[in-house]
């Protein structure tokens, strides 16, 4: 059993570390405070292949594996979790289903611009009453000659305000329940009847846009369908499995940033004539953080390795996402405690890290849902 990264993976990780430290981390506070992503940073990430890590080169991607994706996304999120989730959605929630379920023509037309960084993608699944229960969605698609007519509203869509393309789930046959759900790939900029709705003000990851996608008699081509009619729900499950590796990596990056900040601060901050690092109470907090971070990383790399080798990874992705996100939340709460009053101040990054960590326990499946998925895997059910 070999726990070492390959030379290729080490090179990829080192590249992402350098990029994050030099290009991204210095801008993270500004990205958060202005509630705006940095276009120049995203352009440079695309030049490095970060927007389509596991998409083959012929479709605009970098042609790497999912271990590389997890390593890169962890480092990007260590620098800025808002930028990390933009990258995650382009790769996992948009790029993955288009490549996995799309036709050759769809891969060329819809993977290439997003994987290359020329445009952004998003995933239109969640609705006001269909979050953890996607089968309750109300958005419909009705075939009318050579077109599908889309009606409905998607909510809490990451990248929704900047995306040119979207994978959108809709009900095509109400009589079949979840088996009547179908997914489509949509050119949003060229779809009459589509508008960007409300853009959310959020607790954390403020530098990534989260918006509504509104479709009112929106006409899309007949060949916009991904796969076969009624295959959307199964596609959704697989897409979310892949996406959870991304969110787990985002959470891991946040937790690593927290540990780095706490170690540096505990060496500098003096109380009762001694640096904080000399107190056992501080040491115990750091020890717990470090142990859970290492455990999270092992879970993530296992899930990513399974996906890279076309092996089942649903349970492992859920375990990684649940554990890493809980680790990030717990670590940042303790981090604020280590920083004391300064942890509560916007002068230091701890309060931002804590705000960013919380959403990782919620999106792409709440951790309550993750436990259901894990239990299904343990019991051999799907």
Image (spheres, helix red, strand yellow):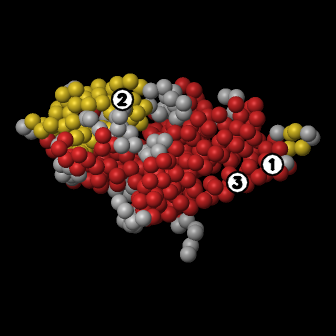
Instruction: Out of 376 and 351, give the one closest to the viewer.
Output: 376
Q: Mark 2 points at which residue?
A: 212
The CA span between labels 1 and 3 is: 11 Å
* Quadrant containing the N terminus in the rendered view: bottom right
Residue 264: numbered disc: none
Q: Name the residue under label 1.
A: 281
Residue 288: numbered disc: 3
Residue 345: quarter of image: top right
Instruction: Out of 297 and 76, give the one closest to the viewer.
Output: 297
Name the residue at the left extreme.
Answer: 145
Q: Report the residue at 55% width, 65% height from top.
A: 5
The CA span between labels 3 and 2 is: 39 Å
* Quadrant containing the C terminus in the rendered view: bottom left
x and y percentages locating residue 31 in the rendered image: 55, 31
Residue 20: quarter of image: top right
Q: Report the residue at 52% width, 35% height from top.
A: 205
Please tell me whether residue 160 is drawn above or below residue 294 in the rendered image. Answer: above
Name the residue at the right extreme.
Answer: 273
């Amino acid at each position: 059993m070999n726990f070492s990264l390959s030379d290729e993976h080490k090179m990829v990780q080192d590249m992402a570390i350098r990029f994050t430290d030099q290009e991204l981390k210095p801008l993270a506070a500004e990205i958060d405070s202005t509630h705006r992503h940095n276009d120049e940073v995203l352009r440079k990430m695309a030049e490095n292949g970060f927007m389509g890590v596991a998409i083959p080169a012929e479709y605009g991607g970098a042609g790497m594996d999912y271990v590389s994706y997890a390593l890169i996304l962890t480092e990007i999120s260590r620098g800025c979790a808002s930028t990390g989730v933009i990258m995650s959605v382009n790769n996992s929630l948009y790029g993955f289903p288009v490549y996995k379920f799309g036709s050759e023509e769809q891969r060329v037309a819809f993977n290439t611009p997003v994987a290359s960084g020329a445009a952004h993608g998003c995933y239109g699944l969640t609705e006001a009453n269909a979050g953890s229960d996607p089968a309750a969605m109300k958005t419909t698609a009705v075939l009318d000659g050579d077109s599908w007519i889309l009606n409905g509203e998607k909510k809490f869509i990451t990248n929704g305000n900047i995306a040119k393309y979207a994978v959108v789930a809709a009900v095509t046959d109400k009589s079949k329940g979840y088996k009547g759900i179908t997914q489509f790939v949509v050119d949003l900029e060229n779809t009459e009847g589509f508008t960007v709705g409300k853009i959310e003000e959020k607790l954390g990851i403020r530098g990534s846009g989260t918006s509504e996608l509104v479709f009112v008699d929106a006409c899309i081509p007949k060949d916009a369908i991904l796969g076969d009619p009624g295959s959307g729900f199964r596609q959704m499950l697989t897409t979310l499995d892949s996406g959870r590796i991304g969110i787990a990596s985002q959470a891991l990056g946040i937790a690593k940033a927290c540990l780095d900040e706490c170690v540096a601060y505990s060496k500098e901050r003096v109380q009762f004539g001694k640096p904080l690092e000399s107190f056992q109470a501080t040491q115990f907090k750091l020890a717990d953080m470090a142990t859970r971070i290492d455990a999270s990383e092992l879970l993530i790399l296992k899930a990513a390795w399974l996906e890279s080798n076309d092996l089942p990874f649903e349970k492992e992705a859920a375990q990684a996402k649940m554990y890493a996100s809980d680790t990030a939340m717990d670590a940042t709460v303790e981090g604020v405690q280590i920083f004391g009053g300064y942890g509560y101040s916007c002068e230091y990054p701890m309060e931002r890290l804590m705000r960013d960590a919380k959403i990782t326990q919620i999106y792409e499946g709440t951790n309550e849902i993750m436990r259901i998925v894990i239990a299904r895997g343990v019991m051999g059910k799907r």
